[in-house]
Image (cartoon, rainbow, N blue to C red):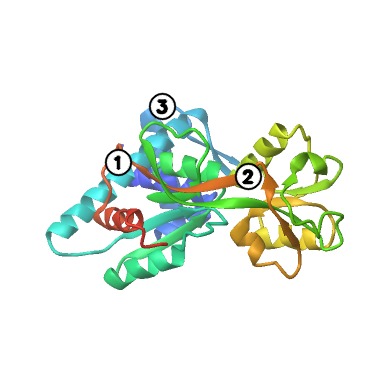
Amino acid sequence: MELRQLRYLVAIVEHGTFTAAAAALHVAQPALSQQMRRLEAEVGVPLLRRGARGVRTTEAGELLLARARRVAAELDAAIAELDQIQGIERGRVIVGAMGSLGPVDLPALLAAFHAGHPQIILEVKEEPTVELVRLLAADEVDLAFATRGPALPAGVVEQVMAEEDLVLVVGPEHRLARRRTPVRLGALAEDPWIAFKGGTGLRQAMDAATAAAGVRPRVAFASNELDRVLALVARGLGVSVVPRSTADTARDQVAILDVAPRLRRQIVLLWREDRPHAPAARALLELARAGVHA
């Protein structure tokens, strides 16, 4: 089993087809296919299945894929550490982030890091909180900003970076639009809701709050695009719960109401504590933990 074969396996799965993987790896497709056949012959079981929708892993392929990613990540980290000893800085840092970071200024963090390390490639993967936790556990991101809440896998740790209120937003013609006192969610039992999709911290917060209020929300629309959620609310198509920082950007389009009891969310920085980080990733993590993003 060769390292390049493991890298090829990861690339094929990530790109979805042999053709796309070959292009990304700058190798001929026949050579890529040949290496995968050799790898499957060596392990004695099929690893990949071709289908109309691309390539998928078998059960054995999924097990080897997880190991392959870890091996590649460790080797990349080792190369980066050796480069650092030689006084060379290079590499890539992948940051995971949910769609709404509120008080956390991710561009400010990346700009501060880039100013000191202009040769490091920075990449941002925007995903819901649940997916960010999975990506971090699979070593597909180096660190991530997410909503606090989901149980964390072994080895993944968190640091609370910011906290903000969640508020109710309704259309300008809604019966509660001119209310100045906090609203109990029970008062919205009959209203249609515009919710975030499953897997997001905001959807989990909404579900928990409405359940505590004895409300089973009738979800009329679901979207992870904050601007779209606010636009639908502004059109009178439903109500929603969003971060205050998000609601404030649409103050001229929606009515913003405090919720009773008060709703809060915490934004956390997540990283792997059970594995070494490449020097660039370690430097960005230290910068983030120091609060440069605030």
Which quarter of the figure is the N terminus placed in? top left
On the image, the x and y values in percent for residue 220 come to: 82, 47
Q: Nearer the viewer, residue 122 or 12?
A: 122
Amino acid type at circle 3 is Gly
- The furthest residue to the front: 181
> How far apart are labels 3 and 1 at the CA level?
15 Å
Nearest the viewer among 255 and 197 is 255
Local secondary structure at mark 1:
loop
Q: Residue furthest left?
A: 86
Q: Which mark is residue 2?
A: 1
Q: Is residue 82 above or below residue 149?
A: below
| Mark 2, residue position | 262
Q: Which mark is residue 44?
A: 3
Near mark 3 (Cα within 10 A), the count class, few <14, some 14-19 or many ≥20, is few
- CB atoms at circles 1 and 2 under 8 Å apart? no
Q: Earlier in the sequence, mark 3 or mark 1?
A: 1
